[in-house]
Image (spheres, rainbow, N blue to C red):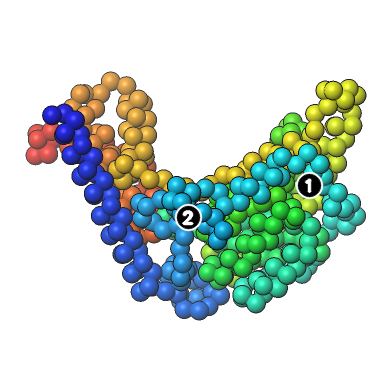
């Protein structure tokens, strides 16, 4: 009897989630169609632009929508159509080949004599410009990459800017204007003969998959190199100051990167993050090689460069996934309830029973509203507000009447 009841509850839950998923998908797409932004490079600048619509409403194709359905990864044409392989890594073989390559060297890294950042850079906002950038990058042996994200006014977040630097030029790619054309740049990121330099790439790797089905193959992550070298710090700010004598205002990372045009300070910040990465990578690779040479016994020799490369490319094997819960907002509700009740000390059994249920209902409402309106959870209702509402709700009939 108990098992039958559990199965009934499970069936109702699955059915409810499926219905919610379909409802949210339909409403979300309808809302995007009805609120598309006009073709313009001006977003969210109240002083200069009357258009306050969300720029993501102009995206024609959204790979990670707000429904409860799982994320589907890129499927290469020659891959088998096996349903079980839908979420396998499309470039696993290429990345594994790099991990297994014992002769990997970074001989393409050159000595840098001039670190100065020029006044000019290239802003990429048309498909023609993007194709020209791909032509440039396809001839390079290495380039550096960074991304800027927006997450406050979007449920899952999206990439608002990609910074790419070669040894000769800095490029800022407007991924809002080019969102639906970014597949053009996919091949150079997947080209195993071209090294891509990131710093702290764990999230960037996932964000590029989420928004554009871009998969990075052949990565050198300067943060992983810092780990291998046992650096006292591994932040990009530390590396910029140590190797380049450059300081940055990390508060700019929290700016609204949807806005167009970007302020001069934001442009400078974005360029710095990618521009100096190639030089920093060069310095770190030299140190890794030096560490290897200082080990006198060949039998105990630790391959510092290969280890940094291995850790970097292991990051590339990550796959983006959407959080799919059994009940909307379940994990947030559980965490909030336990944290609050543990901090309360002695509480009545009535409160201990009803408080988690109220939090669960509020978290479920927040989750559904955030998905429907494409807002972050914290924008719809903060954790503190949920706890306060549940805390002050009447727990008994007497309290309700009083």
Q: Residue furthest bottom?
A: 39
| 20 is higher (above) or lower (below) than 287 | below
The picture quadrant where one finds residue 182 is bottom right
| 11 is higher (above) or lower (below) than 395 | below
Relative side of 113 to 355, left or right: right
Q: Residues within 10 Å of mark 2 (few under 14, many from 20)?
A: few
The residue identified by callout 2 is 81
Find residue 363 and report its horizontal and vertical position in percent: 31, 44
Find residue 10 and report its horizontal and vertical position in percent: 23, 40
Can residue 180 be seen in the rendering of this structure? yes
Q: Residues within 10 Å of mark 1 (few under 14, many from 20)?
A: many
Q: Earlier in the sequence, mark 1 or mark 2?
A: 2
Mark nearer the viewer, 1 or 2: 2
The picture quadrant where one finds residue 270 is bottom right
Mark number displayed over residue 281: 1
Mark number displayed over residue 316: none
Can residue 336 be seen in the rendering of this structure? no
Question: What's the CA distance linking mark 1 and mark 2?
Answer: 40 Å
Q: Quadrant of the C terminus?
A: top left
Relative side of 296 to 142, left or right: right
Q: Quadrant of the N terminus?
A: top left
**Residue located 64% across and 65% down the image:** 185
């Amino acid at each position: 009897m108990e098992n039958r009841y559990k199965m009934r509850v499970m069936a109702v839950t699955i059915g409810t989630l499926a219905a919610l998923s379909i409802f949210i998908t339909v409403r979300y797409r309808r809302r995007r169609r009805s609120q598309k932004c006009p073709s313009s490079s001006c977003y969210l600048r109240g002083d200069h632009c009357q258009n306050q619509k969300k720029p993501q409403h102009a995206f024609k194709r959204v790979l990670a929508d707000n429904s409860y359905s799982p994320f589907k990864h890129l499927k290469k044409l020659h891959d088998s159509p096996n349903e079980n392989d839908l979420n396998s890594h499309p470039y696993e073989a290429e990345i594994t080949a790099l991990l297994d390559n014992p002769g990997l060297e970074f001989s393409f890294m050159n000595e840098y004599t001039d670190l100065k950042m020029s006044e000019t850079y290239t802003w990429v906002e048309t498909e023609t410009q993007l194709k020209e950038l791909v032509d440039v990058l396809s001839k390079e042996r290495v380039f550096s990459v960074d991304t800027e994200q927006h997450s406050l006014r979007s449920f899952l977040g999206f990439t608002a800017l990609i910074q790419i630097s070669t040894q000769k030029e800095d490029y800022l790619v407007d991924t809002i204007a080019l969102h639906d054309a970014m597949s053009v740049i996919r091949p150079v990121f997947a080209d195993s003969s071209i090294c891509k330099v990131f710093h702290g790439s764990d999230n960037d790797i996932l964000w590029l998959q989420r928004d554009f089905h871009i998969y990075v193959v052949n990565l050198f992550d300067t943060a992983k190199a810092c780990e291998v070298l046992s650096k006292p710090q591994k932040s990009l700010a530390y590396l910029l100051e140590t190797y380049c004598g450059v300081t940055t205002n990390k508060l700019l990372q929290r700016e609204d990167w949807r806005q167009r045009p970007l302020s001069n300070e934001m442009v400078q910040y974005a360029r710095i993050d990618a521009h100096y990465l190639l030089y920093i990578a060069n310095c770190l690779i030299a140190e890794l090689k030096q560490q290897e040479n200082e080990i006198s016994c060949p039998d105990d020799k630790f391959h510092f460069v290969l280890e940094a490369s291995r850790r970097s490319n292991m990051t590339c094997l990550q796959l983006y996934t959407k959080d799919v819960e059994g009940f909307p907002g379940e994990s947030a509700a559980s965490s909030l309830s336990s944290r609050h009740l543990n901090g309360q000390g002695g509480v009545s059994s009535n409160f201990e029973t009803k408080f988690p249920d109220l939090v669960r209902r509020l978290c479920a409402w927040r989750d559904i509203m955030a998905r429907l309106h494409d807002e972050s959870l914290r924008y719809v209702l903060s954790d503190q507000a949920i706890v306060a509402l549940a805390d002050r709700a009447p727990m008994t009939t007497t309290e309700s009447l009083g």
